[in-house]
């Protein structure tokens, strides 16, 4: 999965990056002219739908649209069209189902910023059949988080992990969000901080001030402005413990339609304030060197010139690679440190102990269960390490 040769100038600091075959599929799905035709020409002879991973399957609607635009005739297009139609149907049902809850939130004067797939589908893809998504993500103000949770629960959504500990304290500020699931298996992710590794100093306020109004399912909501959206797409896409490639399609789609609207100085400033310079640099470098995306002059050079602290380096590595036997525990530690290092009166009076923080993140009820989950994760991660070494 890690295709990180530096021969083309791409030298990522960390992260899990697409394989050469994934990159061909991305080019066939998103590029134009000879570049797209060449990529599909290399892929098509041995293209086997039954052997595609979920990341590749998620690109098939875009591949279908791009091949049709290039007048490609291939028997596989009928199957790709099926994936497009399925995506359109699933997303339409998801949007319709979630609209009642969004309406209730707005009726209760809860402000909403639409995030990720739903926002990108509305603003950039302009077609619910092109971007598969498993959930709807919304951001509310921290002071309205408890109210939003109550409304969502009243509408029949159930938390994916136990949140009794959060609710009994009446304070959600040490976490960044909660995932909910409906009886129909739809998912709604509620966020009250934009990034997982947030500081408790109001750094999200400016995202709200500069958000732009849009309509979603006829509801007046907001979404991030283009520069903030690009930062969020990149940071969220690469800080995973597994390969994720839909962020590449999102970023390329944004650049092709909104590139002229990029506020370079704001993007850099927000990356600095959120300690996201390293992931942003790696993502933009990848888009430039591996996906032929046009990056504003001087942007990569300014990011390259930044000298990160040792803490930033370790945090980025922990967030984007959990292949060791400890799995995601280091990432949780850095998240805990950042979430609680600027605690004030709006947070729990007694700073949440790290062991309780892990207990919440893993959704376990007591210390004994936490030990069992911890040991099972250690065994699983060790087994995965052995498999990787012998593969």
Image (cartoon, helix red, strand yellow):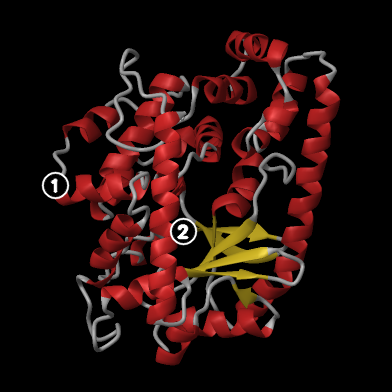
Give whichever of 54, 386 is nearer the camera. Answer: 386
Could you give the CA–CA distance between mark 1 and mark 2, rounded to whole angstroms? 32 Å
Q: Give yes or no for contact between labels 1 and 2 (Cβ–Cβ under 8 Å).
A: no
Left or right placement of residue 83 versus residue 29 in this view = right
* For residue 253, side relative to residue 177 (left or right): right
Residue 295 in view in this figure: no
Front in this rendered view, residue 276 or 324: 324
Near-viewer residue (109 or 204): 204
Q: Is residue 143 above or below residue 304?
A: below
Task: Name the spot of residue 338 as percent of width and height, x first.
Answer: 25, 64
Question: Which residue lies at the image location 37% right of the left edge and 55% below the top edge?
Answer: 328
**Disc 1 designates what residue?**
310
Indicate the position of residue 325 as horizontal and vertical percent values: 34, 50
Q: Measured from the top left, where is residue 347 in percent x and y?
A: 29, 82
Camera-side mark, 1 or 2: 1
* Number of numbered callouts drawn: 2
Q: Residues within 10 Å of mark 1 (few under 14, many from 20)?
A: few
Instruction: Identify residue for label 2.
Output: 211
């Amino acid at each position: 999965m890690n295709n990180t040769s530096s021969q083309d100038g791409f030298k990522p600091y960390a992260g899990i990056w697409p394989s050469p075959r994934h990159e061909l599929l991305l080019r066939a799905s998103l590029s134009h002219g000879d570049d797209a035709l060449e990529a599909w020409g290399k892929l098509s002879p041995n293209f086997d739908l039954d052997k595609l991973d979920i990341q590749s399957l998620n690109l098939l609607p875009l591949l279908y649209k791009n091949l049709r635009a290039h007048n490609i005739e291939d028997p596989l297009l009928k199957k790709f069209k099926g994936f497009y139609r399925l995506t359109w149907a699933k997303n339409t049902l998801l949007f319709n189902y979630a609209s009642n809850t969004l309406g209730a939130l707005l009726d209760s004067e809860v402000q909403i910023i639409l995030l990720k797939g739903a926002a990108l589908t509305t603003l950039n893809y302009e077609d619910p059949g092109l971007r598969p998504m498993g959930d709807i993500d919304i951001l509310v103000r921290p002071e309205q988080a408890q109210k939003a949770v109550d409304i969502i629960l009243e509408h029949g959504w159930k938390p994916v992990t136990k949140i009794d500990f959060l609710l009994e304290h009446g304070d959600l500020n040490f976490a960044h969000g909660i995932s909910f699931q409906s009886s129909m298996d739809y998912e709604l992710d509620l966020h009250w901080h934009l990034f997982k590794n947030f500081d408790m100093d109001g750094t999200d306020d400016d995202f709200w001030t500069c958000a732009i109004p849009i309509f979603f399912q006829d509801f007046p909501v907001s979404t991030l402005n283009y520069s903030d959206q690009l930062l969020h797409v990149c940071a969220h896409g690469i800080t995973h413990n597994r390969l994720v490639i839909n962020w590449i399609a999102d970023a390329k789609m944004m650049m092709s339609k909104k590139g002229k609207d990029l506020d370079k100085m704001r993007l850099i400033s927000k990356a600095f304030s959120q300690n996201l310079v390293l992931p942003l640099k790696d993502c933009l470098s990848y888009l430039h060197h591996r996906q032929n995306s046009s990056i504003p002059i001087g942007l990569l050079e300014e990011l390259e010139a930044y000298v990160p602290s040792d803490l930033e380096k370790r945090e980025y590595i922990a967030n984007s690679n959990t292949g060791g036997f400890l799995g995601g525990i280091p990432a949780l530690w850095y998240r805990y440190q950042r979430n609680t290092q600027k605690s004030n009166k709006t947070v729990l009076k007694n700073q949440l102990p790290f062991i309780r923080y892990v207990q919440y993140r893993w959704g376990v009820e007591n210390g004994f269960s936490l030990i069992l989950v911890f040991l099972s994760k250690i065994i699983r991660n060790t087994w995965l390490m052995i498999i990787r070494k012998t593969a």
